[in-house]
Image (spheres, rainbow, N blue to C red):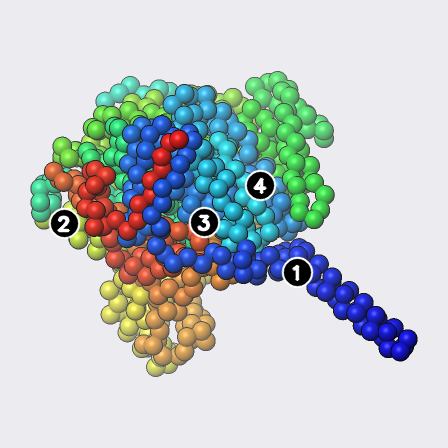
């Protein structure tokens, strides 16, 4: 009996230890694996994030409100906010945005600030150091101070913050977005800095690229004639955003000019990486003379790196002095792209030089002083503390000159190679600006003059704005606080010692390039050069090539009787002008004598191709691969033989040079390069998709995917069969694609249609999280319910949320 009891106690002890062990394991973070117990708990875990899709009717009391707010949700989950005053309006915007995008806003702000190591541990330390060294947190602090220093924008931010945090405060942990449960973290309250950080993140996407390092290498390693042919000031076949015959009726300011002869030391240093060419956007507008109904029509089609949840949040704001519809940037009050009762606007990235790289001469190895304007000036030290989950806090000292931060210290490459070691950067995002106030004002504008006046505040991003209104006006302009530059400044590494390279004066707002009601009846922008060399100020040279802008202009010039349906079809246009110019030459010079039958078949298919990158095309993917391989064979011996990487010349430039008879520029036989690259690419493509080119399928074979913002597996969408390419209006390439398509007809009654790449809800458990991607992929736009009053078209309301004061 005693032995039996001992065995029973021993067995019970083992079971107890096992239970304790399992309980501990289920409730402990194991590396990057979250505690599985809370995650899988049916009452508090991810099961609680499954939604039916319908938002319930609710009446909620909120202490800080001044009066009642009615929020109507339509069939696509778009909130239509009806308020009596600004504070209540932006309180409600913060509230509904937090309801749908809480985790997205929180994660993007942490990512911009360089705080991901707090979530995932040591593997994110280098990412966080990059963000800190880029000055992301520093820039956010500058801009937050600017916005809160203005009484109007401070009120807007306070209201948005209060609404966001009101949603968060009443949210029980079991209802936290699933990403918090997977990552085992809790949401943070919204602060003013969140808005500034998300705006900094957009600045980083649009304006942080520079080719100064790579172009300094190229200019040093190539002879002057070769360099100027491969990297011309103006790309071939480009039609500038502002019509070429535009007159400039102002007296321009004269920029400072440096002493000649500066050669950057870096041209003898390490290789550089190539920037991503795929970020681009389209927008255009036509006046009444070109439309069927006699009203202006505007289209906006911004392209970004797309993820789930979507970059944008669709919303309608209605209050005293405002009735505006469009998309907002989650965390930023107001509407970024959209329309109101009087006008509509679209945006594209400006592309002008907005980040300069400076060679810095430090006094000694301590790097506490640097030389500028003949003097030794003190460096400012900023200590960045990076907290690491499961590890010790990292303290990183970033040195700041008056230009900006020294991103990569000598001897250490923390960030991308485009920012060379020991060099400082000057970036437009560090200029304190108040974009929120600008958005507030142009959301309420009633005329072109009011809209343009609102853009004076739009300083720390450089954007092209297209515009149309009910009075029949159309316009396009290039806006932002642009420094006064000498020719070529910013294209190459700048001399940080010479004050002539400083940003000390700016192009007057009145002198910024714009075109109003041009005789041709349309305006358009596709990230191409905004102006010709006749414009009296230098803006930069590395703009988008001719493809999208030439195709847009070609269609608009020949079209009459335009309708909104026509513009919707135009947005899905897959024609690549570059292929139209280059492929006939490539096929003509192709040596087919040794081809087998599948290769002959492929060449015949290319001869019949209409240059459209449609999803079902058998040759579009091959053409892209062949073109790139051909370019590499042509220029590889010319520029890649060196011990440093140089950004490839634009493909349109290479095609233009070949068509103009400059074959002797390249150290290889063109016919041989074409034929060898054709056969090599055929073999690799055949291995991937079979030897019969007639069975190839562009949309299926390239498998376009949209990933989750935090790259969590299973929360994205794989294998979308879509057409488009970087060179087409429908610019789907890599991870970049149209992020919001909108068409607005500005008649007596505003009519608008649109869609974006994702759903309103950021919850992967919501049925509308990714279902709208099917309509996005095939180009189906939806009517945008632009209600004038709270009781318009009640049958289109699926639920109503009422916020009431105490």
Residue under numbered circle 4: 114
Residue under numbered circle 2: 563
Taking the image as shown, residue 747 lies to the left or right of residue 334, namely: left
Q: Earlier in the sequence, mark 3 or mark 2?
A: 3
Q: Dots 3 and 2: beta carbons under 8 Å? A: no
Q: Earlier in the sequence, mark 3 or mark 1?
A: 1
Residue at x 56%, y 19% (from the top left corner): 373
Q: Nearer the viewer, mark 1 or mark 2?
A: 1
Q: State the mark number for residue 26.
A: 1
Q: Nearer the viewer, mark 4 or mark 1?
A: 1
16 or 38: nearer the viewer: 16
707 or 218: nearer the viewer: 707
C-alpha gap between disc 3 and disc 2: 35 Å
Residue at the extreme bottom: 597
478 or 79: nearer the viewer: 79
Specify few, some or many for label 3: CA neighbours under 10 Å numbering under 14, 14-19, or 20 or more. few
Residue 328: image location, x then y, percent:
36, 40
Q: Secondary structure at mark 1?
A: helix
Q: Nearer the viewer, mark 3 or mark 2?
A: 2
Q: State the mark number for residue 717.
A: none
Residue at x 55%, y 31% (from the top left corner): 138
Q: State the mark number for residue 276.
A: 3
Residue 434: image location, x then y, percent:
41, 27
Q: Earlier in the sequence, mark 1 or mark 2?
A: 1
Residue 209 in sight: no
Residue 134: image location, x then y, percent:
55, 37
Q: Secondary structure at mark 2?
A: loop
């Amino acid at each position: 009996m005693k032995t039996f009891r001992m065995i029973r106690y021993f067995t019970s002890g083992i079971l107890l230890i096992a239970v304790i062990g399992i309980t501990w394991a289920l409730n402990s973070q194991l590396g990057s694996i979250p505690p599985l117990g809370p995650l899988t708990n049916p009452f508090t875990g991810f099961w609680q994030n499954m939604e039916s899709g319908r938002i319930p009717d609710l009446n909620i009391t909120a202490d800080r409100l001044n009066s009642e707010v009615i929020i109507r949700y339509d069939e696509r989950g778009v909130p239509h906010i009806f308020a009596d005053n600004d504070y209540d309006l932006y309180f409600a915007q913060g509230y509904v945005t937090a309801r749908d995008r809480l985790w997205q806003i929180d994660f993007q702000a942490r990512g911009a600030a360089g705080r991901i190591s707090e979530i995932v541990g040591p593997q994110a330390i280098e990412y966080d150091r990059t963000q800190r060294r880029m000055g992301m947190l520093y820039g956010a602090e500058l801009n937050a101070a600017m916005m809160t220093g203005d009484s109007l924008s401070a009120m807007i931010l306070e209201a948005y913050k209060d609404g966001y945090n009101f949603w968060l405060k009443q949210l029980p942990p079991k209802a936290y977005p699933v990403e918090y449960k997977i990552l085992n973290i809790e949401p943070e309250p919204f602060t003013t800095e969140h808005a500034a950080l998300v705006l900094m993140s957009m600045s980083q996407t649009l304006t942080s690229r520079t080719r100064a390092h790579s172009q300094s290498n190229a200019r040093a390693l190539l002879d002057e004639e070769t360099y100027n042919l491969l990297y011309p000031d103006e790309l071939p076949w480009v039609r500038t955003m502002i019509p070429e015959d535009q007159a400039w009726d102002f007296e321009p300011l004269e920029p400072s000019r440096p002493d000649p002869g500066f050669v950057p030391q870096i041209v003898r240093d390490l290789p550089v990486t190539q920037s991503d060419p795929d970020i681009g956007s389209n927008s255009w507008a036509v006046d009444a003379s070109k439309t069927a109904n006699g009203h202006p029509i505007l289209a906006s089609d911004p392209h970004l790196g797309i993820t789930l949840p979507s970059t944008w949040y669709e919303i309608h704001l209605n209050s005293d002095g405002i009735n505006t519809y469009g998309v907002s940037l989650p965390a930023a009050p107001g509407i970024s792209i959209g329309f109101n009762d009087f006008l509509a606007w679209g945006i594209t990235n400006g592309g002008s030089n907005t980040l300069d790289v400076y060679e810095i001469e430090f006094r000694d190895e301590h790097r506490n002083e640097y030389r500028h304007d003949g003097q030794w000036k003190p460096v400012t030290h900023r200590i960045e503390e990076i907290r690491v989950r499961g590890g010790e806090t990292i303290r990183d000292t970033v040195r700041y000159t008056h230009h900006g931060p020294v991103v990569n210290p000598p001897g250490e490459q923390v960030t991308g190679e485009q920012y060379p070691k020991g060099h400082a950067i000057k970036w437009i995002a560090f200029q304190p600006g108040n974009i929120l106030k600008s958005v507030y004002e142009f959301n309420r504008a009633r005329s072109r003059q009011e809209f343009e006046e609102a853009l004076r505040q739009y300083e720390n991003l450089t954007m092209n704005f297209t515009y149309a209104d009910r009075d029949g006006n159309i316009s396009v302009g290039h806006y932002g606080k642009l420094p006064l530059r000498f020719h070529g400044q910013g294209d190459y590494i700048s001399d940080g010692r010479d004050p002539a390279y400083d940003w000390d004066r700016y192009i007057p707002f009145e002198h910024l390039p714009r075109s109003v009601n041009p005789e041709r009846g349309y305006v358009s922008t596709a990230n191409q050069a905004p102006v010709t060399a006749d414009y009296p100020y230098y803006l930069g040279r590395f703009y988008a090539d001719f493809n999208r802008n030439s195709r847009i202009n070609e269609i608009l010039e020949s079209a009459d009787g335009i309708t909104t349906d026509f513009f919707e079809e135009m947005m899905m246009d897959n024609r690549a002008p570059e292929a139209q110019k280059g492929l006939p030459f490539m096929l003509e010079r192709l040596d087919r004598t040794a081809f087998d039958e599948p290769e002959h078949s492929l060449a015949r298919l290319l001869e019949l191709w209409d240059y459209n990158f449609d999803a079902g095309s058998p040759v579009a993917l091959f053409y892209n691969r062949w073109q790139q391989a051909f370019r590499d064979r042509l220029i590889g011996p010319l520029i890649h033989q060196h011990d440093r990487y140089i950004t490839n010349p634009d493909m349109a430039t290479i095609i233009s040079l070949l068509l103009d008879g400059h074959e002797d520029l390249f150290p290889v036989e063109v016919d041989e390069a074409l034929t060898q690259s054709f056969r090599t690419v055929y073999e690799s493509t055949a291995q991937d998709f079979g030897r019969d080119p007639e069975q190839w399928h562009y949309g299926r074979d390239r498998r376009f995917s949209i990933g989750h913002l935090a790259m969590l597996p299973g929360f994205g969408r794989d294998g979308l069969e879509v057409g488009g390419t970087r060179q087409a209006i429908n610019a789907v390439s890599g991870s970049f694609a149209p992020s919001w398509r909108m068409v607005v007809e500005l008649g007596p009654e505003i009519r608008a249609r649109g869609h974006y790449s994702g759903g309103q809800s950021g919850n992967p458990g919501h049925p509308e999280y990714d279902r709208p991607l099917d309509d996005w992929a095939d180009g189906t736009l939806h009517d945008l319910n632009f209600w004038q009053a709270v009781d318009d078209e009640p049958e289109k309301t699926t639920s109503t949320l009422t916020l009431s004061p105490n």
